Image (tube, rainbow, N blue to C red):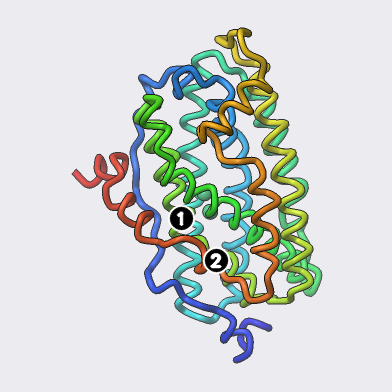
Amino acid sequence: MAGTTGAAKRRYRSEEHSINARDVRFDFRDVPMHYIPGEVLATHIVNVMHLVLPEGERAMAQCLAEAMPYIDDERLKEEVAGFVGQESMHASSHAAAREHLQSLGLDVETYVNAVSWLVDRILGDHGLTGRAKRAWLNERLGLFAGMEHYTAVIGEWLLENPRFEELGMDPAMMDLVRWHGAEEVEHRSVVFDAYMYMDGGYARRARTAVLASATLLPLFIFSTAYMYRRDPERTSDRSWVTQFVSATVRGVIPPATVFFTELPRYLKPGFHPSQLGPMDKALRYLAHSPAARVVGQ
Ligand SMILES: [Fe+2]
Ligand SMILES: [Fe+2]
């Protein structure tokens, strides 16, 4: 087992704080369809988080849970357990937001069921055993480590973007995306470290990262287009292209170029997620998130 060798253990680097799932409560009752006022397309780009990400997060949590029996490093095991708890909480919180939007008339159930079916078919364990099971587990860890790089980078962007306040974004939705973004920053190293512990090969790391980038961008575009078309409150005074360019220029949405500019950084042989932006902003947000405070009261 690769994870028990000294060489494999040396590849694991700690971020020096423990990862734990937070119990949070969001009240979506007063959230309107376009919760970033006047920004229909930008709202639907954020909606991809409620629609598609929960399915991926569930698959990721399941994959990391499968990896746990192979991990002997107690510290890494503890982080993986915390990661599984955080991603499961993300999935259920976004699913609740999606159910609220569905109740307002945004009919996305068929799409969500299709995504769920596809994720299970592609990223499930396929009932494999022995060496094939281990190889497929490592492949999925590589893929999820690549995807987690983007969620960490976008998480940083969500925390630092001042446009949401300026535009009067609904506070419950703003807290949801920032709480999620902050936890993505907090646990940014976990899947990468688990991959390095279980496999650590550069060729697989690079190949799966390219595959992750090539999957996420079209998925975002297709899912946004689907919701935009099904939006019952959409007005047609501005085309989606105009809205997309305008939202990008004004910094209302993350730049789509992130899928190209971040890949070379991730592919550097000495890269580690701890080299991304400072952690303190994320931890400070998590200490004061309204959703977390409701539970603590
Ligand atoms: Fe997440
Ligand atoms: Fe994550």
- For badge 2, the amino acid type reads Pro
Using residue 275 as the reference point, say whether residue 30 is left or right of it. Answer: left
- Furthest toward the front, the residue is 249
Quadrant in the picture for the N terminus: bottom right
Quadrant in the picture for the C terminus: top left
For label 2, the residue is: 273
- Asked if residue 16 is positioned above or below residue 32 in the image, the reply reads below
Residue at coordinates 59% horizontally, 34% vertically from top-left?
48
In whole angstroms, how far apart are the C-alphas of marks 2 and 1? 20 Å
Residue at coordinates 22% horizontally, 47% vertically from top-left?
296
Q: Earlier in the sequence, mark 2 or mark 1?
A: 1
Would the CB of label 2 be found within 8 Å of ligand 2?
no
Foreground of the two, 271 or 118: 271
Q: Position of residue 139 (x, y in %)?
A: 74, 64
Q: Which quadrant would residue 41 be assigned to in this image?
A: top right
- Asked if residue 200 is positioned above or below residue 66 in the image, the reply reads below
For label 1, the residue is: 85
Foreground of the two, 122 or 185: 185
- The answer to whether mark 2 and mark 1 are in CB contact below 8 A is no
Q: Position of residue 9 (x, y in %)?
A: 57, 85
Using residue 214 as the reference point, say whether residue 285 is left or right of it. Answer: left
Marks 2, 1: nearer the viewer: 2
Secondary structure under tag 1 reads helix
